[in-house]
Image (cartoon, grey):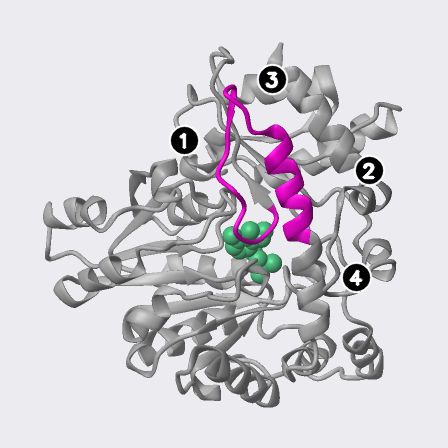
Amino acid sequence: MIKDFIKNLKPSSTLLINEKSNKLESEGKKIFKFGFGQSPFKVPQKIIDELKNNAHQNKYLPMQGLEDLRISIAKYISKKKGQEYSSSNIIIGPGSKELMFLLQILFDGEIILPTPSWVSYAPQAIIGRNKIKWIETKSENNWFPTAKEIEDIIKKDKKKKYLIFLNSPNNPSGQICTNLDEISKLAKKYNLFFLSDEIYSELTFEDNYKSISNYCPQNTIISTGLSKWCGAGGWRLGYFILPSNLSEITSQLKVLASETFSSVSSPIQYAAIAAHNNEHADYINHSKNILKSVGNYVYENLKSNNVLINKPQGGFYLLPEFVNKKFSTSSEMCNSILKETGVALLPGSDFGFSQNRMLARLSFTDFDGENFMKNTVHNEEINYDKIKIYAPKIIEGTNRLKDWSNN
Ligand SMILES: Cc1ncc(COP(=O)(O)O)c(C=O)c1O
């Protein structure tokens, strides 16, 4: 009864590792949850209050999303990007993941995915029956593709339309795309469009964030939402910002939205207005300060001749490569790490790397962010002693992993 191509799909590995870690923990094993990537922080209190105040909102909302919310997002994003967007450029979804899925359903062309790529892009492309072209990137290029690597694919058939996914700061590498200028030139030459997944953009450690939308806004769909910076993954609110020249896509997304989720939960949409009024700079800076300090701690203490890692630049993740380890697959390596050390990681193969590269994604969010925030101020220097008190599992997990890598 089930289509063959659907049968071959597995549940998302990020959600699976969470369940596996919880199960081992319930059996009494000490687990370091470095596999699942979820904000460790609480949603800002004002936004929680807005959700409470709007619990009575019980009407279906417009399929494109609440007009007042789209106006507040348009203002927020226009200011951030220095580009004018209006409410008509925005569509609200139950998480950006669902909107990306609908985009795969409507898109007619080929999908270009850099390796590494977030775990859901490829399965969604397969469900949308789109062909995937992979580009294996290099750590020295910040794990992003070069313009030449992209062009080599396009040149094989210049008539096709291409949609490339660029996710910066990146899950799983924690890196930022720095060669946007050269990549953007391709958009002027070919039928190349970008899905710029900016879900971690508010959590960029340095204040110089630029995305491909700054270089070629007319070819870029921006995807973002509340899940990461606002600690509200479970609220399920994300959105796309589409340029006016791609209004046909916005209209068609609206049709698909109306035939699937109808509209995002009303109380959440009303509460999300308060998330876009520019009042949360301290909360965001505080989150970034903690994440940067914790990420740098793991980076500094894990990197060695045996473990190659790029310094984290934003978000929650590191992508260590265990160069002295010989397993037949990275999944086998991660199972062995979990068994021997209790540290849960995700194998590099889940992000598109070949099985024989001993890469793994490490998420440095296994700490109580609410408590960490409560006991520090937003701009203070966060030293080892603070990390030891408020993120002890990060320290112990890193030590265990380091010992494992040296044996
Ligand atoms: C790179 C990336 N994009 C998108 C998402 C999905 O976000 P949302 O909660 O908006 O669906 C995630 C969440 O894990 C992510 O890591």
Q: Nearer the viewer, residue 383 or 244?
A: 383
Which type of secondary structure does the marked residue at label 3 adopt? helix
Whether label 4 lies within 8 Å of ligand 1 gets the answer no
Which type of secondary structure does the marked residue at label 4 adopt? loop
Which type of secondary structure does the marked residue at label 1 adopt? loop
Asked if the residue under mark 3 is in contact with the one under mark 4, i.e. CB atoms within 8 Å, the reply is no
Write down the residue under mark 1: 353
The residue mark sitting in front, 4 or 3, is: 3
Write down the residue under mark 4: 42
Considering only order in the chain, which callout, 2 or 3, is on the residue closer to the N terminus?
2
Tell me how many marks there are. Answer: 4
Residue type at mark 2? Pro
Considering only order in the chain, which callout, 1 or 4, is on the residue closer to the N terminus?
4
Considering only order in the chain, which callout, 3 or 4, is on the residue closer to the N terminus?
4
Give the residues drawn in magenta, as a range: 291-316
- Could you tell me residue 372's position as x and y percent? 82, 54
- Answer with the quadrant where ligand 1 appears in the image: bottom right
> In the rendered view, would you say 381 is above or below 237?
above
> Residue at point 56% right, 17% down?
332
Write down the residue under mark 2: 392
> In the rendered view, would you say 366 is above or below 199?
above
> Residue at point 39% right, 37% down?
139
- Could you tell me residue 220's position as x and y percent? 34, 69
Q: Distance between the residues labelled 1 and 3?
A: 20 Å
- Label 2 crowd (10 A; few <14 / some 14-19 / many >=20): some
> In the rendered view, would you say 96 is above or below 310?
below
- Could you tell me residue 383's position as x and y percent? 75, 47
- Could you tell me residue 373's position as x and y percent? 81, 59
Q: How far apart are marks 2 and 1 (CA)?
A: 31 Å
- Label 4 crowd (10 A; few <14 / some 14-19 / many >=20): some
Residue type at mark 1? Phe
Considering only order in the chain, which callout, 2 or 4, is on the residue closer to the N terminus?
4
